[in-house]
Amino acid sequence: MKLNRLRNWALGLIFLAFIVMYIGVFVPVLMPYLLIIGIIMILISVFIYFRVGAMSMQIPTLECPHCHKKTKVLGVEDGCMYCQGLIQVEMAEDGGLYLIPRSKTT
Ligand SMILES: [Zn+2]
């Protein structure tokens, strides 16, 4: 779920960059600066996209205890990508990872 949030962030940043550059059309004095800011913002979001893609390849897919779909978890505690249910990563005795549901109170 954290990966999805990062991806949404990158998407929002691209939209924001377009808005910033669009303002430049109406304010010719600021145009060069706004264009540079817009381009930098797009580069950052492209970088985030790239990182998210690389990270999701390294992360093992585990079965969600709530909806039993294969989900990707970032860190020890995260939410399911499909049902948003809170899950916790536990290590089995043989070293393998598995997911258990996490209570919201803690
Ligand atoms: Zn789930």
Image: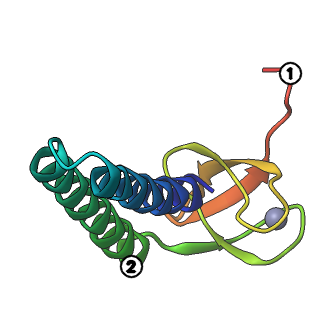
**Residue occupying the far top of the picture:** 106
Q: Where does label 2 land, which residue?
A: 57
Question: Could you tell whether 8 is left or right of 101 in the image?
Answer: left
Secondary-structure class at tag 1: loop
State the image coordinates of residue 83 (x, y, percent, origin top left). Answer: 85, 62
Q: Residue at x 79, y 78 (%)?
A: 69
Relative depth, front residue between 92 and 44: 44
State the image coordinates of residue 92 (x, y, percent, origin top left). Answer: 60, 58
Which quadrant does the N terminus fall into? bottom right
Write down the quadrant of residue 25 in the picture: bottom left
Q: Mark 2 to mark 1: distance in Å?
A: 32 Å
Classify 69 as above or below 93.
below
Relative depth, front residue between 64 and 12: 12
Question: Could you tell whether 77 is left or right of 84 in the image?
Answer: left
State the image coordinates of residue 3 (x, y, percent, origin top left). Answer: 51, 60
Residue type of the residue flagged with mark 1 = Thr
Secondary-structure class at tag 2: helix
| Mark 2 or mark 1: whose residue is earlier in sequence | 2
Residue type of the residue flagged with mark 2 = Met
Q: Where does label 1 land, which residue?
A: 105
